[in-house]
Amino acid sequence: MPRPIRAVISQQAMSHNLSVIRQYLDNARQAPAAAAHGAQATSPGATHIWAVIKANAYGHGLETAIGGFAQADGLAMLDLQETLRARQAGWQGPLLMLEGFFEARDVPELVRNRVVSSIHHPEQIRMLQASTLAAPLDVFLKINTGMNRLGFAPQQFGEAYQALQALQQHGKVGRIGFMTHFADADGAHGAVDAPAQVFHDTVGQCQGSISLCNSAAVLRYPQLAVSAADNWVRPGICLYGSSPFANTTGEEFGLRQTMTLQARLLSIQHIKQGQSVGYGSTYTAARDMRIGVVACGYADGYPRSAPSGTPAWVNGVATQLAGRVSMDMLTIDLDPVPDAVVGDWVTLWGNEGPHIDEVASAAGTIAYELLCALAQRVPVHVEYSGEVVEK
Ligand SMILES: *Cc1c(COP(=O)(O)O)cnc(C)c1O
């Protein structure tokens, strides 16, 4: 008998979110500002969406996400193994390795699987120069526009681009695109203006696809995704229903949550005023009250940093954590839910529960971290069109 905990994943919500993002892009394309810049006149077509499915699709399961994002133009990930699994799952479309390859022996594998590779470092160019390939590798040359994590500085761009063009001549490199990643797309308004300018100045007249926008940039600066060049956006978190911005939830953007985490009540304690609950006795009852013990702890991926007061729902009623989260259990105030009994489901985040963005915020983190942390031991149920399939 499995522990009474489950993550319910909705593929329907995934495809809904993808169409919401597509709508944002279509709206930007039709905006007068975009038209004034000649986007519609010169653009070869719609902006393309790489659905980002790194980190086991933000904890949702790779194959499930591939089904949910069947209408995406491409899938972006970090791991060679993930690209192989995507092909095995029947995905025929483009695949992007966001950090490119890590070892020379991976390059022929990428070519065999028709994977596009980011190129962010001269070492990767050296590996390409040293490799023998059956077909050319399509690449996105990554420019560091201020994140200072990966990518070529603008002054290194010319040399890197020339080296890739030489490799193109030798049939080792196919199409060359250009990408960057913003440090502050979720920050102050206008924080991407300078890096976007650096990007465009650096790429200059070079012809090729471009890729700039993560979720925050797609939602806040969709005009950056509308350009004369073939433009590929790279949304991740918004496709899973969460907001990339502090103090907002995905709902404000019309996004639906894709993961609901639930566990049953294992036990109910009646405690007296002045008694405390859990490790460290951090919560002390201000009155006689009922405490619900829930079959979910930090070993399931629920954040230990979530303090008393973090929202949780029982039978559709909002209540909150009372006491410290432990490895396998957490405790909640049952006073708002007098009819709750052992065996009832408690929703820790997701549909008919608190929004994961609210839980993340209460725990001092972001939904990305909660989603990715979902533990292997939590049984996953995949839902499509209201049907639940146990995995
Ligand atoms: C993870 C990642 C993304 C997606 O970011 P979100 O904030 O989840 O939209 C996009 N681009 C790169 C390079 C990434 O590493």
Image (tube, rainbow, N blue to C red):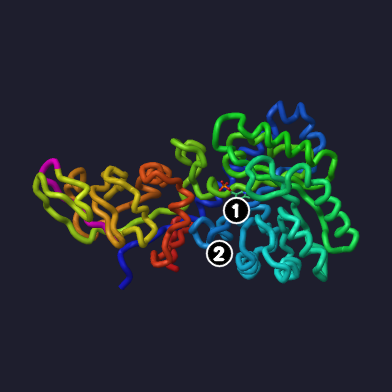
Compared to 130, does 33 lie above or below?
A: above
Q: Please state if 176 lies on the left or on the right of 55 as rendered.
A: right
Mark sitting on residue 52: 1
Q: Nearer the viewer, residue 324 or 35?
A: 324
Membership of 7 in magenta stretch: no
Compared to 368, does 286 lie above or below?
A: above
Query: Can the viewer see residue 16 in this picture?
Result: no
Query: Can the viewer see residue 347 in this picture?
Result: yes
Element class at badge 2:
helix
Spot occupied by residue 300 in the image (x, y as percentages of width and height):
37, 61
Front of the two marks 1 and 2: 1
The residue at 66%/48% (across/down) is 49
Label 2 belongs to which residue?
63
The residue at 44%/65% (across/down) is 389
Identify the amino acid type marked 1. Answer: Val
Element class at badge 1:
strand
The residue at 69%/32% (across/down) is 30
The residue at 75%/29% (across/down) is 35
Cβ of disc 1 within 8 Å of ligand 1? yes
Spot occupied by residue 348 in the image (x, y as percentages of width and height):
34, 51
Which region of the structure is painted magenta? 286-295
Pick the quarter of the image with the C terminus.
Answer: bottom left
Location of residue 191 by image quarter:
top right
Identify the amino acid type marked 2. Answer: Glu
Pick the quarter of the image with the N terminus.
Answer: bottom left
Cβ of disc 2 within 8 Å of ligand 1? no
